Image (spheres, rainbow, N blue to C red):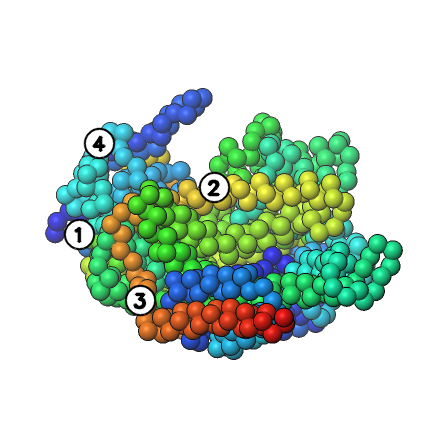
Amino acid sequence: MAILETRQLTYTYSIGSPFEKTAVDHVDLKIEEGEMVGVMGHTGSGKSTLIQHFNGLLRPTSGQVLLDGQDIWADKKKIRDVRFQVGLVFQYPEYQIFEETVFKDIAFGPRNMGLDDKEIKRRVLETAHDIGLREELLKRSPFDLSGGQKRRVAIAGVMAMEPKVLILDEPTAGLDPAGRDKILSHIKRYHERRKNTILIVSHSMEDIAGFADKILVMNKAKLFCYDDTEKVFGRAEEISEIGLDVPQITKVFMELKKQGLDFGKEVYTVPYARDLLLKHLHGKAGDGQC
Amino acid sequence: MLRDVTIGQYFPGNSIIHRLDPRFKIVITLIYILMLFTGSNVVCLAVGAVYTLIAVFLSRIPLKMFWKSVKPLLPFLLITAVLNVLLVDSGDVYFKWKFLKVTEGGINISVFMIIRIVLLIMGSSLLTYTTSPITLTDAIERLLSPLKLLKFPVHELAMMMSIALRFVPTLIEETDKIMSAQKARGAEIDTGSFLTRAKNMISILVPLFISSFRRADELATAMECRCYNGGEGRTRLRQLKASARDVIALVITLMFYAAAIAVSIIFKHLMK
Amino acid sequence: MENIIEISGLHFSYPSDGDTEPAEVLKGIDLTIKEGEFVAVLGHNGSGKSTLAKHINAILLPTEGKVVVDGIDTADESRLFELRQRAGMVFQNPDNQIVSSVVEEDVAFALENLGVPYEEMRRRVDESLKAVNMYDYRQHSPSQLSGGQKQRIAIAGIIAMQPKCIILDEPTAMLDPQGRREVMATIKKMNREQGITIVLITHYMDEAAQCDRVVVMDKGTVALDDTPREVFSHVERVMEIGLDVPQVTELAWELRKAGCDIPQDIITEDECVAAIQKLFAAK
């Protein structure tokens, strides 16, 4: 069964004012449990509005959001529980840190859940480990840490609620390549261990290409597509037309195809491109050498 | 929720009121307030009301907007009106119950006071609706500039004011964002007991303060890099030029003031 | 051509705040930049690239060594404003460098500070706004603009000073792809049409690849300094520093490692397409 589902989800900002704008327009979507989903779309495409519906921060103007088959707005009083089950990490989350120690800040969510101290401690230690924060850092003030570490503290704060679905809005924004790779690999490891559902919003198709099972693309408030990564890359040309950046390597293979060199596969990572080329260069043998 | 703040909101437009020199607009508003407070009877306020309605009409701002700025003060107005009605004891008695008395004087004073305050709010709203905050700040700086001779930091205050205005939308947006982020971690901000809400406010205020300090620091560096060195020797892109229009508006206002006084004196004589 | 920036033997340490040792951020930098050059300073966080940028504008002064910009020693306090007019600086966060609530007044800010007379100020503000393609927005409030537009306003505010050189400290780090493209296009235009020297601090290799010259910083020193093509052909070294190379360069490097006869200095898609076709033609 789908863990998250939307039915004709529509959201309109500032109804009745001159600034009225439909940010999400009749979106139908089913996200299966345990999937790693990349969410794409340029600024103003409605992707940020969409993800804020998944944990009930925004209430649909019309349509439904279902978590585990239940309408999350069926009982308004339970909306806070939905927020514990669908964790949302905002963009630049390090700016939300406020406690005096790293431990306390990670524990803020679990404490709001009403867990006991022992359980809170277990969760904080486990998530700190998952996200690659050494234990001695937990006693330090979060404000003394480096930018990348702060970002990981903030992500851990949401992970520690052990949500069934974890949504990260551009977790790598503003980081350098090393910081970006580190965060992405920790998220990937966390996903492999917990097998929970993860949605990552990103502007970079290159980042997403490396690990997403599926890709969701929003365009002009509508769902442009939601499909397996390879199939989405099969529509690279359309995606580039709606203003999103397609990885350089994909562009190269698109051009090769135009010029008559068709490998019959969608290419979106460098290792895959290398293997594919080597295989074709040698015929079928493929010992990985030229 | 935070975005719905309307007090002091500016409505861009190109009406004759919008185009008046902001310095004149401030002075005119001050004269207007004086008119409302020196007028001592209903007839005098009627002149003020006519003046206000003409100005509102000329500004092309829908009356609805003025209602919006009066509305939040209604409870306050009603309470004071009721107190006045019940406690003022003069003239004919219309109704009496134990120590409470409704008298002609009480009703007069209540009506008078409500009209006066509504006109006051409308007039000052008209100033802020038709003048952008930044223009207003600029005009205040220029009106106060003689105080520089007394070593009063006019430029610094105006600069502070305009930077504050510049960052209001930024900080509102930021507050919204931090609130959503903490709500996503289960902080109860709109619901829950007063104590939990107060405690959760800390989770919003701390990040907000930290980011404001960071912004202030970065802005200061950016300003220095653009050669900011206080008010000494600065020139301005924004030029304020008073025209005949502004002088005419001022004269008309003064004429209304004179008319209000004249009418109230005549009215007093007639009442005798 | 003349050198506009001359940095020699530059060392810099942040002063100790009591309980920590003063950390040396820049460890002996020698660098000269010629007038009209378009230089990227590429490095990871903490490599010292932003600290270096702040020296060109005298926001920081060297602990040791010398920085001379257009003949002005940055340590010469009496010529500070002159220096900052000739070498303007654009910062990372677009919100934290816009002073005014009206776009055109923000662009005029530096000119107001310098006491430029009204007529000339008006002309220069309009020209600058047109140069960054934001003239139609001159009466807007910055809060109505996108990140890329705000950065272009910040650039206009610097151009209005008619500088010889602009230093941009990670101007695109907080922008979406659309904003990044806008800012890059604007910077390139300034360099090409007005001959302004550009020093672009960045950690995006695709931006560095568009420059004439790339200076790679690592641990407070200059690790590589050459054309983008030369720099990125050192794939292993660049990756070891913690930076990316273009995907096409990485692919060529991987194929070479596997024994294919493919040039190592590929940095554009077209070059990559041609090289792969050649490989298959030779088969």
Kindly identify which residue carries mark 2: B213
Dot 4: within a 10 Å radius of its alpha carbon, few (fewer than 14), some, or many (20 or more) residues? some
Q: Amino acid at mark 2?
A: Phe
Distance between mark 2 and mark 1 Cα atoms: 37 Å
Q: Amino acid at mark 3?
A: Lys
Kindly identify which residue carries mark 4: C65
Q: Amino acid at mark 1?
A: Glu
Mark nearer the viewer, 4 or 3: 3
Is disc 1 in the same subunit as disc 3? no
Is residue A197 found left or right of B59 in the rendered image? right
Q: Label for residue C143? A: none
Distance between mark 2 and mark 4 Cα atoms: 32 Å
Residue B192: where, in percent of width, then height?
76, 47
**Secondary structure category for the residue under label 2:** helix
Kindly identify which residue carries mark 3: B241
Distance between mark 1 and mark 4 Cα atoms: 22 Å
> Looking at the image, which residue is at 67% across and 50% down?
B184
Q: Which one is nearer the viewer's eye here, A164 or B198?
A: B198
Is disc 2 in the same subunit as disc 4? no
Dot 1: within a 10 Å radius of its alpha carbon, few (fewer than 14), some, or many (20 or more) residues? some
Q: Amino acid at mark 4?
A: Gly
Is disc 2 in the same subunit as disc 3? yes
